[in-house]
Amino acid sequence: MASTTPILLFASLLFLFSISSALRPHALVVPVAKDAATLQYVTRVDQRTPPVLVKLVVDLGGRFLWVDCENGYHSSSYRPVRCRSARCSLAMANACGDCFSAPRPGCNNNTCGVFPENPFIRTSTGGELAEDVLSLPSTDGFNPGPLATDRTFLFSCAPTSLLEGLAIGAAGMAGLGRTKIGVPSQLAATFSFHRKFALCLSSSTSSDGVIFFGDGPYHFLLNVDASQSLIYTPLIINPVSTAGTYVAGEKSAEYFIGVKSIKINEKTVPINTKLLSIDRNGVGGTKISTVTPYTVLETSIYKAVTSAFQKSLANVTKAAAVAPFTVCFNSKEIGSTRVGPAVPSIDLVLQNANVFWRIFGANSMVQVNDDVLCLGFVDGGAKPRTSVVIGGHQLEDNLLQFDLATSRLGFSSSLLFRQTTCANFNFTSNA
Ligand SMILES: *[C@@H]1O[C@H](CO)[C@@H](O)[C@H](O)[C@H]1NC(C)=O
Ligand SMILES: *[C@@H]1O[C@H](CO)[C@@H](O)[C@H](O)[C@H]1NC(C)=O
Ligand SMILES: *[C@@H]1O[C@H](CO)[C@@H](O)[C@H](O)[C@H]1NC(C)=O
């Protein structure tokens, strides 16, 4: 019988090893669908006990994850966070919430009060900070693997009314912003992986794009590691919060980059470059947004860009404007390339003239009907808070890696050049 001991020991070592590798994933992965009706990007995660698959609209600059707790939230692992607790200070919150009806998730006394926000209806409400189980598939960068579970994932409860304007079926929003309780930082802290995440939005409403939490590789069929050959630019902190409700001194949780100039067909567009820097009131600059379907430009920039674009496509017959766009063309006269319609390139020039984000036809043009292609940028009015908001259409089929530790953005440029797309992650599980 003496010989059984080593075998048992070996078996239990294997068991321990498999548990710890499940607990210590190198990275996590979630699918992201593009909702055809709203053009919002919707991810899916397991939350609660027993687990429920929750659909959440992705808000790149959102401060935290929030869900509707008023309607059908049942979970034996739900715990409200007390005000003045260490968990509450992670949220930089200082309000104590009380609730004057029967206790339930989202309605407890002496809880940590935060302000979940719905950017589509520009509304924020008071919400109770809470923790519950959240599970996401781990990944080796090629496929999804075993689920990794955070048992005390922080999120905010919100009333059902805050779901107004969200894609059908969504129960809240997943904030990927730059805060300690943003989804990327919490997952990185729980699983001790790099404070990095990557976003790859699909241009198709029928095949999922992907978000990776943690470092690469990020593999797409056939055999493209999109974490390789990224171009890097610093992420800039806006010193003034851009949220609807915030505490004094709070920085913006959104991701800003330092666009210095804009080129069309490699020629600089004359614009007031002051608009491209962030002033001490937090006004101006360029941010990246997943809750804005098309890039929004301050009026004078919009006029300069659309006029330069039309000049460099002067050969092509113009078509009547189709809202929200104003510059449209007869698509039959425009050729096609691997990276979309053959139109002048639009460059967002970054820290120096050699570093630019080049936008090709697939990301600049929108096919509004069989015969008409429009320049997919919109006018943001004369005094917007942020001068350039890079929106979803311009992000699709580009991989963006946000590194919170070094405060830099890595971007791939169009994956179509590499004969793949953001919809080409292999979601077949090898768990
Ligand atoms: C909170 O405290 C108030 C006052 O003591 C009480 O009326 C209310 O029922 C409590 N709410 C909950 C959810 O326990
Ligand atoms: C217009 O078309 C001609 C001939 O196809 C081409 O040589 C020229 O570069 C085009 N001009 C512009 C502004 O696109
Ligand atoms: C996708 O992954 C599965 C599981 O690892 C594998 O069997 C399959 O061949 C992969 N598909 C492609 C097209 O590589």
Image (cartoon, rainbow, N blue to C red):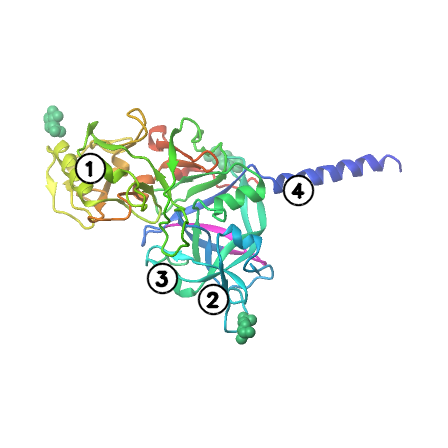
What residue would you read off at disc 1? 272
Which of the two residues, 12 or 221, is positioned nearer the viewer here? 12
Q: Earlier in the sequence, mark 2 or mark 1?
A: 2
Q: Residue furthest top?
A: 354
Q: Does mark 1's beta carbon lie closer than 8 Å to ligand 2?
A: no
Per the image, label 2 sits on a secondary structure element best described as loop
| Screen quadrant of the C terminus | top right
Q: Earlier in the sequence, mark 3 or mark 1?
A: 3
* Marks 4/1: CA–CA distance: 57 Å
Range of residues picked out in magenta? 41-53
User: Which marked residue is nearer to the observer: mark 4 or mark 1?
Assistant: 1
| Screen quadrant of the N terminus | top right
What residue would you read off at disc 2? 70
Which residue lies at the image location 45% right of the left edge and 42% below the top edge?
211
Per the image, label 1 sits on a secondary structure element best described as loop
Of the numbered discs in the image, which one, if any, rests on residue 19?
A: 4
Q: Position of residue 48 (x, y in %)?
A: 56, 57
Q: Earlier in the sequence, mark 4 or mark 1?
A: 4
Residue 402 painted magenta: no
What residue would you read off at disc 3? 164
Q: Earlier in the sequence, mark 2 or mark 3?
A: 2
Specify whether 296 is left or right of 419.
Answer: left
Q: Does mark 3's beta carbon lie closer than 8 Å to ligand 1?
A: no
User: Which marked residue is nearer to the observer: mark 3 or mark 1?
Assistant: 1
Tell me which amino acid carries mark 1. Answer: Asn
**Does residue 333 appear in this view?**
no
| Circle 2/circle 4 CB separation < 8 Å | no
User: Which marked residue is nearer to the observer: mark 3 or mark 4?
Assistant: 3
